[in-house]
Image (cartoon, rainbow, N blue to C red):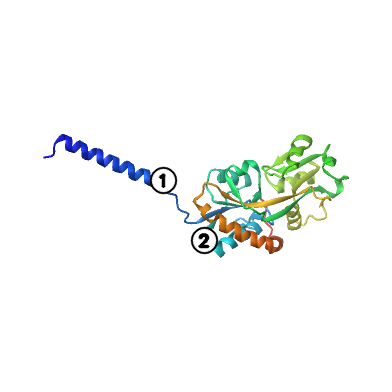
Amino acid sequence: MLSPQTNFKRMMFAGLFSALCFSQAAAAPATCDRVVIGAGSDYPPLHWYDGHQLRGASVALATRIFDEMGVPYEVRYFGPFPRLMANAQAGHLDVVTTLKQTPERAAFLTFTSMPAFINPVAVFVARERSFAYTGWSDLEGHKGGIVIGTRFGEPFDSYMRDKLKVESSSSLESNFKKLALGRIDYLITGYYNGVAYMEGHKLQQQFKALKPDLNETQNYVGFYSKSPCMRYYKEFDRRMAMLVKAGEPEKLIQNALSDWRAAPHTMR
């Protein structure tokens, strides 16, 4: 029969061993079995949800690179853009494709070194209620609309906040409806996005984009900075830079526009 002292020593040893094992397990890095990819649901031709899956140039670019790398992935629909970003910040996905780089987003996302797409931003108006426009100051005194959570880059974001009267809606579709009813005088969105909506709904005779473009923004791929899938970031970044230099993103945009025209879907 073991003495109380011996039993105590064995219990102490077992406890220390368990604690050591737990500490090592906690310190071990998580694995990346597959990359979970998310994208906006309401921004054709870059990305949109067709009721069954996410599609568009952004999705095609990311999946093409991971295919070439031989990395398993899942493209997952997270809902409207604000919900997507909430999930990204919470670490529920590994890659967001594609979006503008802002300080707030850089707090939890690591962006590719080069933009994936150059995205001109335009002011859209109803043809029958158009107004003279040569630059940002001509928007003052008019009521505008944007999709909630949208960023257009500095210095325009600050100018819009300080100088313009702009209200947010849940989708581009609701903004175009407001524009048709005269509840807003203009809406701001990506040029390709606005054109895709008008073409998909046969509205080219009702609305138009004003010139010049409001500005030109850059869309990047963002990796969740704490994701174990960050192990793929450097190689993904290298391959994407090669595709950008070869002009592949523009081809993907044109292909996505063709897909959208063939089967436009109600924007969510």
Label drawn at residue 8: none
Q: Residue at x 37, y 46 (%)?
A: 24
Q: Tag 2: Cα neighbours inside 10 Å, few (<14), some, or many (≥20)?
A: some
Q: Is residue 148 found left or right of 9 in the rendered image?
A: right
Examine the image and state in which quarter residue 51 appears: bottom right
Residue 77 vs 107, above or below: the answer is below
Residue 13 at what x, y percent from top left?
25, 40
Residue type, numbered disc 1: Ala
Neighbours of disc 1 within 10 Å: few (<14), some (14-19), many (20+): few
Say which quadrant the N terminus sits in: top left
Task: Tell me the residue that label 2 is attached to.
Answer: 71
Residue position for label 1: 27
Q: Is residue 222 left or right of residue 21?
A: right
Q: Residue at x 66, y 42 (%)?
A: 149
At label 2, which amino acid type do we have? Val
Measured as percent of width and height from the top left, residue 247 is found at 70, 63
Q: Tell me the residue at 71%/48% (across/down).
A: 172
Does residue 187 appear in this view?
yes
**Can residue 52 be seen?**
no
**Residue 252 horizontal/vertical position (percent):** 68, 62
Contact between labelled residues 1 and 2, with CB atoms less than 8 Å apart: no
| Left or right: where 68 falls relative to 210 | left
154, 201: nearer the viewer? 154
Q: Secondary structure at mark 2?
A: loop
